[in-house]
Amino acid sequence: MQVRADRVALEGPHGTLLPPTSLTVGEGDLAIVHGEPGVGVTAFGLALAGRLKPTTGTVHAEGVDAALTELVAVVDAPAVSEPDDALPLRVVAGEELALAHRPAGKEDVARWLAKHDAAPFADARFENLAPQLRTRLLAELAAERKGVRLLVLDTPDRHTSDVDSWAGLARELAGRGLAVVVLTATTPLSALPVPPARLGSAEQPAPQHLAPEPTEPTEPTEPTEPTEELTTSTDGDPA
């Protein structure tokens, strides 16, 4: 499965939200997209997910018969999918599990948090979670949604200057076979772990492929017929 954005642009009531931008990303790929802080970065993520219709250009998925809205989840988008800061983690997790049509009762949430090493933070206000934990849990919850094969992490760098805190997670998710796009806005280009795609550009570096390639099954070898060994008698004639 690949998602292709071809010269996608978005115009708003007060001007351009997103200049023409192209990107191709497939399962097991990690692409980092960098733009100036503002609504354009999130707008590109929402266009990838089929939640904003481009003014010009197209976004489509190849190799799968499903809508972009089913294939792509935008994680922690400001004013769109970011949780209410005042809610406790257990409530946020329950809402996300319900959205994913997963069991979301009190015990189900407790088990999910324990599985992801977050049980001690169940009652913590979401705004008080460490940035690394926040991004990891929201990404894992989005990955629970049936059919999701592309995660768009929306500006995790707005919560922290520690690039490794989200880059390691993005690599891990891509290594599991998901397509992963990380939108960045405040991290200096020189600090990004891979050459980024740029908003407003049609020519982009290839994404980093991190999922292991499937191995070809080996053909079974045909058993060989046993050969008869000749023994030699003492007079030199075959026995």
Image (tube, rainbow, N blue to C red):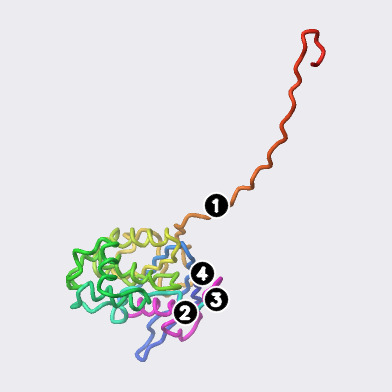
> How far apart are the alpha carbons under marks 2 and 4?
16 Å
**Residue that mark 1 sits on:** 215
The circle drawn on residue 8 is 2
Q: Residue furthest top?
A: 235
Please state the total of marks drawn on the protein image.
4
Residue 158 in which image quadrant: bottom left
Q: Please, what is the three-letter code of the amino acid marked with disc 2? A: Val
**Residue that mark 4 sits on:** 2
> How far apart are the alpha carbons under marks 2 and 1?
36 Å
Q: Earlier in the sequence, mark 2 or mark 4?
A: 4
Q: Position of residue 77 (x, y in %)?
A: 32, 76
Disc 4 residue crowd, few under 14, some 14–19, many 20+, Cα 10 Å: some
Q: Earlier in the sequence, mark 3 or mark 4?
A: 4
Q: Position of residue 209 (x, y in %)?
A: 46, 59
Residue 169 inside the magenta-drawn segment: no
**Residue that mark 3 sits on:** 65
> How far apart are the alpha carbons under marks 1 and 3?
25 Å
Q: Position of residue 128 (x, y in %)?
A: 17, 70
Q: Earlier in the sequence, mark 2 or mark 1?
A: 2
Q: Nearer the viewer, mark 4 or mark 1?
A: 1
